[in-house]
Image (cartoon, rainbow, N blue to C red):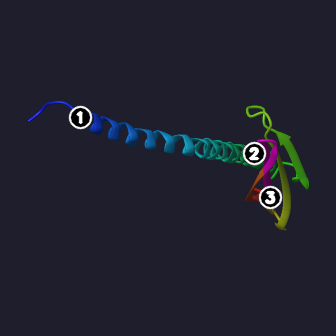
Amino acid sequence: MTRGLTLISVIIALAILMVGVATLFRVYPAITRLSGRSRGQTVAVFIADRVRTALEEAYGGADDPLPPAVVEGADDEHPGYTWQARFVEEKEGLYRIELTVSWFREGVRVTQEFQEMLRRQE
């Protein structure tokens, strides 16, 4: 019995390795694109949560002013992200907040919409 690898077994191992590397090179751009998309959506959820909390603090109390029809803003921590909140009165003291977070990805405007309810304290 001989010890070591034959030339044929080394060539086969290299061919298998090359197929794996080539597959990774084809999949890598898709993984990068999906990662960027996921990051954008995660940031949008984070912004929506902060905006919802701020709106509740500003308009949720009995002594607070009534919410306006529309409130807009930009996020200081995440440049390029903007938001718009529309208040729709469902019944007295109960508002539906339609919150839209927008940003640009690869030159295309992307939006993610959220809906929350705001009940004013009495």
Residue shown at 80% from the left, 37% from the top:
80
Q: Quadrant of residue 6?
A: top left
Rounded to the nearest angstrom, the CA distance separating label 1 from label 2 is 66 Å
User: Quick one: SS at disc 3?
Assistant: strand
User: Quick one: SS at disc 2?
Assistant: helix
Q: In which quarter of the image is the C terminus?
A: bottom right
> Percent position (x, y) of residue 71?
88, 48
What type is the residue that disc 3 sits on? Answer: Glu
Q: Pointer 1: what residue?
A: 6
| Main secondary structure found in the magenta portion | strand
Rounded to the nearest angstrom, the CA distance separating label 3 from label 1 is 68 Å
Along the line of sight, the residue nearer the viewer: 64 or 8 = 8
Rounded to the nearest angstrom, the CA distance separating label 2 from label 3 is 11 Å
Along the line of sight, the residue nearer the viewer: 40 or 69 = 40
Label number found at residue 51 = 2
Q: Quadrant of the N terminus?
A: top left
**Around disc 2, counting alpha carbons within 10 Å, would you say few (fewer than 14), some (14 to 19), or many (20 or more)?**
many
Residue shown at 83% from the left, 52% from the top:
85
The magenta region covers 98-110
Residue shown at 27% from the left, 39% from the top:
9
Q: Pointer 3: what residue?
A: 98
